[in-house]
Amino acid sequence: YDGTCFLSLDKCLPQRDFLQVVSFPEVPHPGGALALEYDEEWLSILRACQSYLCLNRRGPQLPPAASMREQIEKERVWVRERAQGDAGWVKVPSNFEHTLPPHRPGSVVPGGARQQPPFHPSPQTEAFVAKLSLPMPHVRTVGGGG
């Protein structure tokens, strides 16, 4: 197939189109290969919401919408400064690498199928949060910390 396919998923519920495949024909690009880029607003939202990330059952109370919008705009300035200083900063890197072996049907799962697998760091995630100057909060939970 010579095109791009996007797969859209939703909850499998009555009266819902839970699976949709949209195909786009390939369009020649005059500058060579196309590259994916991060969305400026999404990066800003990630930075603005970092302090509200919760790994416990009870999350922190979110601020009023106006305050959140103000924080997102502040972070957008931060994102724009980096993007303007480095044209490649918003490009999604082609740095995929395997961090875990693939699932093999019928293989024995250490600890049984119901046990949470051990933490395995992802170089892609580490590079992404470093780009945004964000912490790796899930690392705190390794070893039972909170």
Image (cartoon, helix red, strand yellow):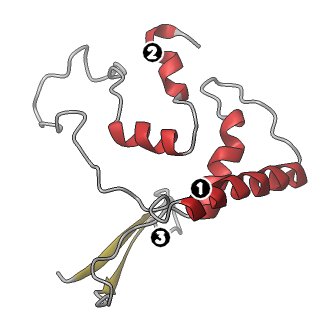
Report, in whole angstroms, how far the alpha carbon at label 1 lies from the one at label 2.
32 Å
Numbered label attached to residue 82: 1
The residue closer to the viewer here, 56 or 12, is 56
Q: Are marks 1 and 2 in contact (CB under 8 Å)?
A: no
Report, in whole angstroms, how far the alpha carbon at label 1 lies from the one at label 3.
39 Å
Q: Is residue 15 left or right of residue 65?
A: left
Q: Is residue 27 left or right of residue 83?
A: left
- The spot of residue 93 in percent (x, y) is 35, 56
Tell me if mark 2 has few (under 14), some (14-19) or many (20+) residues whose alpha carbon lies within 10 angstroms of its own.
few
- The spot of residue 9 in percent (x, y) is 44, 62
**To which quarter of the image does residue 108 belong?**
top left
Tell me if mark 3 has few (under 14), some (14-19) or many (20+) residues whose alpha carbon lies within 10 angstroms of its own.
few
Q: Give the residue number, with chain letter if any, for mark 3.
A: 17
The amino acid on which the numbered mark 3 sits, given as a three-letter code, is: Asp
Which residue is depicted at the point 12% across and 37% down? 105
The amino acid on which the numbered mark 2 sits, given as a three-letter code, is: Val
Q: Give the residue number, with chain letter if any, for mark 2.
A: 142
**To which quarter of the image does residue 58 belong?**
top right
